[in-house]
Image: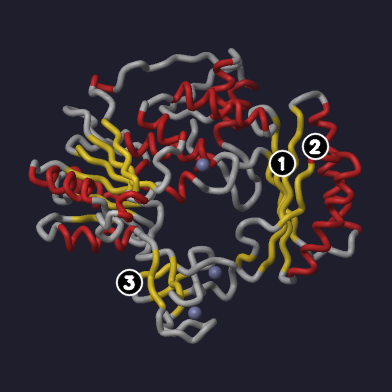
Amino acid sequence: EHENSYKQQQPSPRYNGRDVAIVLAHSFGAKTLLGSATPSIESFSNAKNNKYGYIELKERYSNTGFPEIVTVDLKEERKHKRLKEEFSELLLEEIGKVLERKKQIIIFQNRRGYTPLWMCNDCSWTAQCNHCNVNLTYHKKTHQLICHYCNTHYVPESRCRACGSNNVRMLGLGTEKIEETLELFFPNAKTGRMDLDTMRSKNAYRKIIDDFENGHIDILIGTQMVTKGLDFSNVSLVAIPSADSILHYPEFRAHEKAFQMFTQVTGRAGRKHEAGKVIIQTNDVKHPVLEFIKAHDFEHFYTRELIERKKFFYPPYSRLIYIELSHVHEQTVEQASQELAQTLKTKLQKRLLGPEKPLINKINNKFLMCMTIKLEKTNSFNDMKHFIAQSIDDFRMFSHFKAVRIIVDVDPL
Ligand SMILES: [Zn+2]
Ligand SMILES: [Zn+2]
Ligand SMILES: [Zn+2]
């Protein structure tokens, strides 16, 4: 139900498989069954408003209790110098205990590679891609800096390109570094890594899951791949060494996505015979999402999230249309987006936000500009939608900016 990969992002047609299923079922008079432990705010709101029927599972499958969830305050740990390579004493201790009991561990970190930054200590310069406005990720095994957007590989430079200093270092925590660190701390434990880099060959996915299931791997480290519905019977500890980037992603769905991701990965702990334990390390222990996760409280998370959505007029209270323009020249795409926005605003007025530079405003040598339109879910919706479509068609035909690429995403995720 909530699964992001149901949404087709690129190329068009941009649609959500879930929504298509509902429409299709409706036109054939069939019923649709949506299943999720972490429904999207939109679907849950439809259930609450009796647009959908609703059945709640009050007990966990096979009656195991919910895992105990502990947060570790990274700020405190750092202050008291209790961090070893970003691992708290508590986490290392718990890993040790679990290994002694011959149980298994899952470590979830949503960054692949060794470190997400290659940075100058003196002037804060970071190595960036020549083709994208993106920091390069250091991959230690191949000793390369790689752009995760256009996949260009670079040889790491030991001198800072901005100030010439030799004081360049790696910063941050990727799955590759976690694996290396844990092998250092627990030399007798067998580790396995599940991310895009290790899953390239055809059978790699099946193999690592079999190995983990059969106990050939003690610690499984991975990106979001490890959160997706896998059911291992011997896992008694799940750890998230760094929750912050997920909690503070700058978009309105950040809290919803964080709640879903953490709940999904948390659910990997203790599936069959014991409840299991989850350790989440963060600089923001008081973050509301973590409070709800700890309490296993979807209902209140949902209520709070709805208040926020209402206040800022986001879905499910409105519908969004996202427009992105791209071109090889920055000035051209900026002018084009200003002109298109001006036309759209004649009717949309304050419903249009932007144009603005997206967080990553250059990918593959193309500069990007974006705007977001918030529409009321009233009868005016179709009228507005047709106006937007017509304006964009006209813009493509008659403006000076025919070479500017425009993509439109209705109900973006
Ligand atoms: Zn790039
Ligand atoms: Zn420098
Ligand atoms: Zn936040």
Q: Looking at numbered disc 2 in the image, what kind of residue is underneath it?
A: Lys
> Residue 146's image quarter?
bottom left
In the picture of the structure, the residue carrying the numbered disc 1 is 321
In the rendered view, does 380 fall on the left or right side of 189? Answer: right
Among the two numbered marks 1 and 2 on one chain, the one whose residue lies closer to the N terminus: 1
Corner quadrant of residue 181: bottom left
- Say whether disc 3 or disc 1 marks the residue closer to the N-terminus: 3
Amino acid, disc 3: Lys
Q: CA distance from mark 2 to mark 3?
A: 49 Å
The residue at 53%/48% (across/down) is 249
- Mark 3 touching mark 1, by CB under 8 A? no
* SS at badge 3: loop
Q: Residues within 10 Å of mark 1 (few under 14, many from 20)?
A: some
Q: Which mark is residue 140?
A: 3
What amino acid is labelled 1 in the image? Ile
Q: Which is more toward the observer, 182 or 132? A: 182
Q: Is residue 3 left or right of residue 407?
A: left
In the image, residue 119 above or below residue 7: below
Answer yes or no: disc 2 within 8 Å of ligand 3. Answer: no
Q: Earlier in the sequence, mark 2 or mark 3?
A: 3
User: In this view of the protein, which residue sits in the foreground, 292 or 208?
Assistant: 292
Asked if labels 2 and 1 touch by Cβ distance under 8 angstroms, the answer is yes
Q: Which residue is mark 2?
A: 385
- In the rendered image, the vertical position of residue 77 relative to residue 6, given as above or below: below
Q: Is residue 210 visible?
A: no
Q: CA distance from mark 1 to mark 2?
A: 9 Å
**Is 157 drawn above or below residue 235 in the view shown?**
below
